[in-house]
Amino acid sequence: MAPMMRSALALALGAVLQAPALAATAGHPIERVIGLLQDLGKKAEQEGKDEEVLYTKFEYWCTNSKKSLDKAIAEEKDTIERLQDEISSHEKNIEVLTKEMADLTEEIAELGAAGEKAQAERDEAAALYKENSDAHTATIAAIAQATAALEKSRTETDSPTLNLSQQKVRKVLELLGMHVTESQRGTLEVFLAYEPKERPDTKAAGDYEGHVKKYSFKSDSVIELLKELQLKFEDELTEMNTEETNAINAHQLATKARDQATAAKQASHDEKDVTKGETEGALATAQADLQSTQQDLEADTGSLDSTTKACDVKKAEWAQRSEVRENERKAIAAAIEILAKATGVRTEA
């Protein structure tokens, strides 16, 4: 457009220089120049209006684009802040869950070790009980046999019967071990040391009767002692059985409670493990969303910068073009005015 305007001005200048000659012959050549300049002015004005429409649309796009980008950037910043808080919360929860699971694992291991120790102690106690129970049972049986043999020897005082009784008592004494007093042991040892005399002739019948009475007295005291010891061992065995039964029941109750505690802790551990897995999944999602949102923010920030620059450049160009167009319009109007005055040609208002 600018070259065309320059041509129009140059034509106007040439027409001014030839104005006297043109006025002498005919006025229509200047009128044609003026008409041409008027047409160019109108065309320039229309092109200016068309460009203004286009620029207005572009300016509207700039405004809306920057507004949309500003809104998107604000939302993305809010989203980033929220996601960062969410990620921090997930990481803290995972840390807490991991520690709680480790503590539960340790507690379960401790319960297992306590169970193994308790079972070993129970097995040891059961073995000791069996040993003592068997010993007491054998001792009671031996005492009963010795007592029966002694009671029989009270009526049968021959040497074989007495020897059998002494054998039974000797066995009892071996089984008793440290379970008798020195006095009780002495009574039994005296009986074991007793040696019967041969049955005398008839003329010595009185002496034999005395021997029988003496032996009967000793056997009676031994029988009473054995009965007392049997009762003692039976009471001890009863008490031993009761204690073992109570120990078994207590062990079973403790084992049941420990198993229930272990099951509860294991269930809690498994539940926390599931929660931890879900939290880790949510964390991964939040981290991915954060990365994506940060990329969107970077892209939108870049778009806003480039859009702002493009709009500023276009605005500057529009201002410059508007100024140039206005100057051209004024130049054409001035040229027309000059030509009209120089030639006396009338122009439309």
Image (cartoon, rainbow, N blue to C red):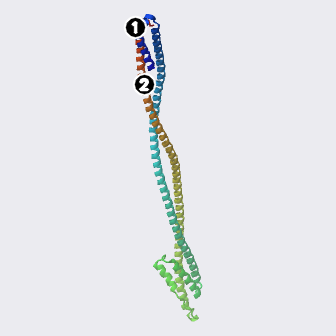
The answer to whether one can see residue 229 in this image is yes
| Picture mark count | 2
Judge by depth and name the residue closer to the eye, 85 or 335: 335
What is the three-letter code of the residue carrying label 1? Ala
Residue ID at (57%, 95%): 203
Judge by depth and name the residue closer to the eye, 266 or 333: 333
User: Is the Cβ of the residue at disc 1 closer than 8 Å to that at disc 2?
Assistant: no
| Location of residue 4 in the rendering, given as x and y in whole percent from the top left corner | 45, 18
Identify the residue position indicated by label 2 in the image: 317
Residue most toward the top? 24
Residue ID at (49%, 81%): 187
Q: State the SS at label 1.
A: helix
| Location of residue 94 in the rendering, given as x and y in whole percent from the top left corner | 47, 48
Q: Tell me: 34 left or right of 137.
A: left
| Mark-to-mark CA distance, 1 and 2 | 37 Å
| Location of residue 166 in the rendering, given as x and y in whole percent from the top left corner | 55, 84
Q: Earlier in the sequence, mark 1 or mark 2?
A: 2
Q: State the SS at label 2.
A: helix
Q: Tell me: 211 left or right of 15.
A: right
The residue mark sitting in front, 1 or 2, is 1
Identify the residue position indicated by label 1 in the image: 342
Residue ID at (44%, 32%): 306
Judge by depth and name the residue closer to the eye, 241 or 107: 107
What is the three-letter code of the residue carrying label 2? Glu
| Location of residue 246 in the rendering, given as x and y in whole percent from the top left corner | 53, 63
Judge by depth and name the residue closer to the eye, 26 or 290: 26
